[in-house]
Amino acid sequence: MTMAGDLILGGIFTFRTGFRGRIPSFQSMPSPPTCMNINVREFKFAHTMIFAIEEINQDRTILPNHILGYKIYNACGMSSIIKAAMDLTSGQREIIDEKNCTKSDTALAVLGHSGSTPTMGFARIIGSFQIPVISHFATCACLSDRQEFPSFFRTIPSDNHQSRALAKLVKQFGWTWVGAISSSNDYGVNGISAFMQAARAQGVCIEYYEAFEQTGPIHQLTRIVEIIKFSTSKVVVAFMTHREIKVLAAELYKQNITGLQWVGSDAWITDHSLTDSEGHSILVGSVGFTVRGAQIPGLKEHLSQVHPSKFPDSQFVKDFWEDVFDCSLNRTAKTLARKPCSGSESLRDVESQFTDVSELRFTNNVYKSVYAVAHALDDLFKCEEGQGPFSNGSCADAQHVKPWQVLHYLQNMNFTTRHGENVFFDENGDSPARYELVSLRSITPAAMRLATIGFYDATLPSKRRFTMSGADVVWGGGSKMVPVSVCSGRCRPGTRKVLQKGKPVCCYDCVPCADGEISNTTDSMECIKCPVEYWPNTRRDACLFKDVEFLSYAEGMGIILTFFCLMGVILTAFVGIVFFKFQQTPIIRANNSELSFLLLFSLTLCFLCSLTFIGRPSKWSCMLRHTAFGITFVLCISCVLGKTIVVLMAFRATLPGSDVMKWFGPAQQRLSVVAFTLVQVLICILWLTISPPFPFKNFQHFQEKIILECALGSAVGFWAVLGYIGLLAILCFVLAYLARTLPNNFNEAKFITFSMLIFCAVWIAFIPAYVSSPGKFTVAVEIFAILASSYGLLFCIFLPKCYIILLKPEQNTKKHILGKTGHTDSHN
């Protein structure tokens, strides 16, 4: 299809899908390929180019003194496409004078092709002549290489952008386990490779990748179908043309493989020829990015006026007409079955994909391509001499415009279309990437319906590039629910991912966080250790304050120990009252009543000091509990030791000529108690001065709780206090043991011996129990030792006397005391 003009634009389109041809033998001229099925979309592209050129020719604001012409080739098969490009590069006009002279008819720019691989084929060739090539549909990222394709431009974004957008789409819906299929040509291989690289960067794993060609062997297609059938991923990214997807869909349909979510590239997601596919129903719910749609006023009217009479030399127009109206323009053997065309047929009277302008996406790219060249030429002709872009500020010769000059202006062209879209090319000849996310709602043999569900704009910041429109989405198989396609389920908070050996990173096990660690995000790779004063909750997704543990008055153990402490005080007070009331009786007078009352007082303090071990430790309670315990116990043992010495001295005082009692009378007894106690006081003062006990948070015994306890400060001080008590207890035990057989009816030495035996046994057992008991049980063991030894002294020394005083008063007489031995205590 041609039209003469001052300036010629070339166009290369493929009006038929597929072809048949033989492999050249290089021994004879190859036969031209036989083109097959009609491609209505390509035919519309060509007529959009014609419409844009006619619109520009009628517009006096752009190229007012020039007429644009065109030469449009319908070429199928690589060899035909290359031949068409060469014709446009070095084409000849018809004979222009009687001497058979001809004039070069080189196109100033070539529009097309729709396919990346054919475009690469001829763009390399005519790029050497610096003739601009502007494609409306060739998206292969490889075409952005300015070294290899120095004159290539496109009004469609590079696949680099589409691949990244598809990767972001897959990640957006949580599809981390996908299959990938592509055409085995430059468009498919380069596009899917860029997608897989971008997807892996987003954390998406590719279960399988396969490529095939429509014209390839059938076993290759069968193998791919088997892979899809037995794969676990439910999402398939198909980076291919409409030819391959139709073949694949038909084979999947035959084997009843459904329920897949298809993610498509722009080469097929909006192609209306899918309606011809046998398995088009399995593609319903497919999603993919495509260029934004637009409205072109007047285009529908132009397309409706197409008629074979306007293109008498175009066989394709005749074939198209016969196909649309199912009639025959010329009676041939092939068309005898059809009725003759009446000549009154009109495209206005039929519903046709050719005249449908509701979805002008790639068609708009053709329209923009024509206007891009027109604006570049307009800038060229508006150049003012001396201010031009060429050497010495020169401009192009308006009578002899060269393609390389158009190439320069095209690189710097920038204009806005009538519907407000800004058109320009970057340094690689690419257009800005702006896509619509579309969903294939339905496909019928008559039509297919798309819905825009989102947008992608690569010119915006990364976080704002992809947005959803809020429209209802129909997913693969007609489902309203977003499909799930993962190798492993999401790991909830409280767990972490552990990769499965030998599998991709998307295949993992969810392992609970270790003790003391949490994860508060889904799909966490690592668990976070809680701070030292915190511990995970049961779900291990948050750190909570650890429970603080100490021996409290409110808990059961604290209540029981407090009860026994107070009971000890009450019993001691009761014994003191009994002794006070009966202090003049022989049994009390015979056993040193003064030391007995002092012993009862010290036992009361021992019981009371146990209470300082219960409750929350503080600075003062920690210092008080150990020092009070040490001093009161020494006071207690000192009294017992004094009583033991008195028993020994009393016996020796009864021997003839002995005056020992005058050396250990009441004054000396008091002094000994004070002296023994003062030593312990000095030890405690040194302990509190050098390194006193202090409250301490123990994190070692239990990981999940904090033990509040009193640290000893100086362990030497603590063991010195205990050691001194033990030394006095042993001394008292030895002396009482020696005096146990003294001939006295109420000899206290027996009871003191037994009480000291209990005392020593308790504190010997206390040491390992104290060291090994955890947490508050350490304090409980210490209180138990104090109470046990105190009760031992109280019961062993005072219970027998109370028994006689209260229950056997007849034995509480001097006669009874002296009845058997005749001895008396000289200190009475």
Image: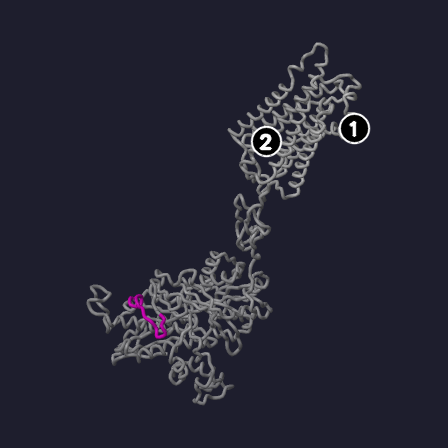
Q: Where is residue 57 drawn, in percent x and y?
A: 30, 79
Q: Give whichever of 138, 603 is nearer the camera.
A: 603
Residue 505 showing in the rendered view: no
State how far apart marks 1 and 2 are (Cα): 37 Å
Q: From the viewer's perspective, is residue 718 above or below residue 29?
A: above
What residue would you read off at disc 1?
808
Q: From the viewer's perspective, is residue 174 above or below residue 350?
A: above
The quadrant in which the C terminus is found is top right
- Asked whether residue 415 is drawn in magenta, I would say yes
**Total marks drawn?**
2
Location of residue 618 (image quadrant): top right
What amino acid is found at the position of numbered circle 2 in the picture?
Ala
Q: Give whichever of 652, 787 is nearer the camera.
A: 652
Q: Where is residue 211 drawn, in percent x and y?
A: 50, 63
Q: Is residue 225 left or right of residue 345?
A: right
What residue would you read off at disc 2?
628
Q: Which of marks 2 and 1 precedes in the sequence?
A: 2
Given this view, does label 1 or label 2 mark the residue nearer the observer?
Answer: 1
Name, please, the residue furthest toward the top: 657
| Circle 2 SS class | helix
Residue 342 showing in the rendered view: yes
Location of residue 707 (image quadrant): top right
What amino acid is found at the position of numbered circle 1 in the picture?
Lys
Bounds of the magenta span?
408-421
